[in-house]
C-alpha cells in the first residue's frame, strides 16, 4: 500500500511540474509576442479637427496591415496647447515608443522634449508640421506654395467681380505654428503689386468660434476677402460670411464636411484640401522602415494639395 501511495504522489508531482513548465512556456511565448511589437505613437496638434482624424486613419491603415510587429497609438491634446503636447511626447517615451509621428504645435516649445526623446533612442518622423529639431523625415504639404494658390484663387474671384482694391483679413492659428505661418506667407505673396491691403492677422488658435468672431469683425470693417489658414479658422470664416449675408470672398484650408457644406452654400469660394491620410500612411511606412533598420530615401515629401470649389463638391 505504501509503495502504491508513493507512486501516486510521484505521478502527481511530475504532472504538476509538467503543467508548470507548459504554463511557463505559454507565458514566455506571450511575452515574446508582445516584445516583438514596436510601439509607434502619432501625436497631433489636437484631436478635434477632421484633418487629424484623417492623418490617424492613414497611419492606422498601415499599422493594422503590420499588426504583427507594430503596436500603434494615437495620442493628442484636446486643444492646441504646447504643454499638453509636450506631456504626450514624454508619456510616449515613458511607454517605450520606438517612433513618434509628430505634428508639432509650434517649432520651438517642444524641441527640448524631442531632444530628450531622441537621446533615449526614439525616432521622430514629422507629419504635417515639423519642429525645429532634426527628424528622420517630414511628410507634409508645401504650405507656402499652397498658401499662394489660395491667394491667387481669391484674387481671381475679386477681379472677376470687378473688385481691384480693398482690405483683406487673415485668420491664423498661432504666430509660431510653422505650417500655417508658411500658408500666410504664400497667401500674402499673391497680392504683391496689387492695390489690395492685407490687415493685421488675427490669431484664433484654430478655434472655430473665436475665428468666427474675428472674421465678423473683419466683415464689419468692410473687408472684401478673408482667408482661414486651417480647418477651425476656415469654418469660422465661412460661418461669419454666411451669417453676414455679404458678398465677401472666403478662401480656406483643409477639408471637412462642415467646410464642404459652406462651399456648397456659397459662403466660401474654395478650400485648399490637403492629403492628411497620405501623411499618415507615408509617415507610418517610414516608421516601419526605421524599426526594421532600413534607410529613408526621401527626407522631405510634399504630400500634395487640391483646390476644391463648389463644382467639386458632390
Image (cartoon, helix red, strand yellow):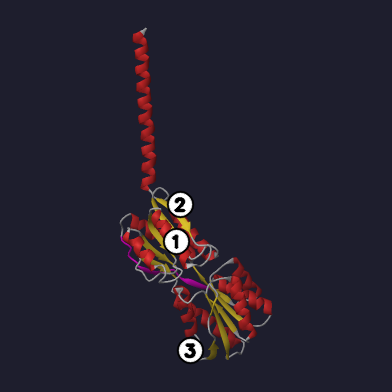
Residue at horizontal 37 percent and vertical 64 percent from the top: 114
Query: What separation in Å lies between label 1 and label 2 (alpha carbons)?
Result: 26 Å
Quarter-of-image position of residue 167: bottom right
Label whose residue precedes the other's in the sequence (3 or 1): 1
**Residue 116 x/y as whole percent:** 35, 62
Residue at horizontal 36 percent and vertical 61 percent from the top: 117
Query: What separation in Å lies between label 3 and label 2 (alpha carbons)?
Result: 47 Å
Residue 82 shows up from this direction? yes
Q: Is residue 302 magenta?
A: yes
Please name the residue that numbered disc 2 is placed on: 64
Please name the residue that numbered disc 1 is placed on: 87
Label 1: which secondary element = helix
Residue at horizontal 52 percent and vertical 79 percent from the top: 150
Could you tell me which quadrant the N terminus lies in? top left
The magenta stretch spans which residues?
295-307
Label whose residue precedes the other's in the sequence (3 or 2): 2
Residue 311 shows up from this direction? no
**Residue 275 x/y as whole percent:** 48, 67
Residue at horizontal 54 percent and vertical 90 percent from the top: 196
Choose between 141 and 199: the one closer to the eye: 199
**Residue 187 x/y as whole percent:** 49, 81
237 left or right of 126 in image: right
Quarter-of-image position of residue 118: bottom left
Label 2: which secondary element = helix
Choose between 265 and 47: the one closer to the eye: 47
Q: What number is the disc on residue 192?
A: 3
Amino acid at each position: 500500500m505504501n509503495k502504491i501511495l508513493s507512486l501516486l504522489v510521484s505521478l502527481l508531482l511530475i504532472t504538476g511540474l509538467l503543467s508548470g513548465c507548459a504554463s511557463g512556456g505559454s507565458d514566455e511565448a506571450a511575452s515574446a509576442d508582445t516584445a516583438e511589437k514596436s510601439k509607434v505613437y502619432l501625436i497631433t496638434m489636437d484631436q478635434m479637427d477632421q484633418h487629424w482624424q484623417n492623418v490617424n486613419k492613414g497611419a492606422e491603415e498601415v499599422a493594422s496591415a503590420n499588426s504583427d510587429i507594430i503596436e500603434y497609438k494615437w495620442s493628442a491634446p484636446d486643444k492646441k496647447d504646447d504643454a499638453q503636447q509636450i506631456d504626450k511626447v514624454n508619456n510616449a517615451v515613458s511607454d517605450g515608443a520606438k517612433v513618434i509621428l509628430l505634428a508639432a504645435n509650434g517649432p520651438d516649445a517642444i524641441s527640448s522634449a524631442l531632444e530628450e526623446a531622441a537621446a533615449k533612442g526614439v525616432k521622430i518622423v514629422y507629419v504635417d508640421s515639423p519642429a525645429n529639431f532634426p527628424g528622420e523625415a517630414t511628410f507634409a504639404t508645401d504650405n507656402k506654395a499652397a498658401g499662394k494658390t489660395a491667394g491667387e484663387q481669391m484674387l481671381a474671384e475679386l477681379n472677376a467681380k470687378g473688385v481691384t482694391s480693398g482690405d483683406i483679413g487673415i485668420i491664423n492659428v498661432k504666430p509660431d505654428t510653422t505650417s500655417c505661418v508658411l500658408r500666410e506667407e504664400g497667401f500674402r505673396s499673391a497680392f504683391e503689386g496689387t492695390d489690395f491691403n492685407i490687415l493685421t492677422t488675427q490669431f484664433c488658435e484654430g478655434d472655430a468660434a473665436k475665428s468666427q468672431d474675428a472674421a465678423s469683425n473683419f466683415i464689419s470693417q468692410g473687408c472684401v476677402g478673408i482667408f482661414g489658414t486651417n480647418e477651425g479658422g476656415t469654418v469660422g470664416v465661412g460661418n461669419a460670411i454666411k451669417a453676414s449675408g455679404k458678398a465677401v470672398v472666403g478662401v480656406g484650408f483643409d477639408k471637412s464636411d462642415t467646410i464642404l457644406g459652406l462651399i456648397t452654400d456659397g459662403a466660401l469660394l474654395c478650400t485648399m484640401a490637403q492629403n492628411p491620410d497620405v501623411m499618415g500612411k507615408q509617415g507610418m511606412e517610414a516608421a516601419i522602415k526605421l524599426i526594421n533598420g532600413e534607410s529613408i530615401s526621401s527626407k522631405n515629401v510634399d504630400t500634395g494639395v487640391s483646390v476644391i470649389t463648389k463644382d467639386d463638391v458632390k
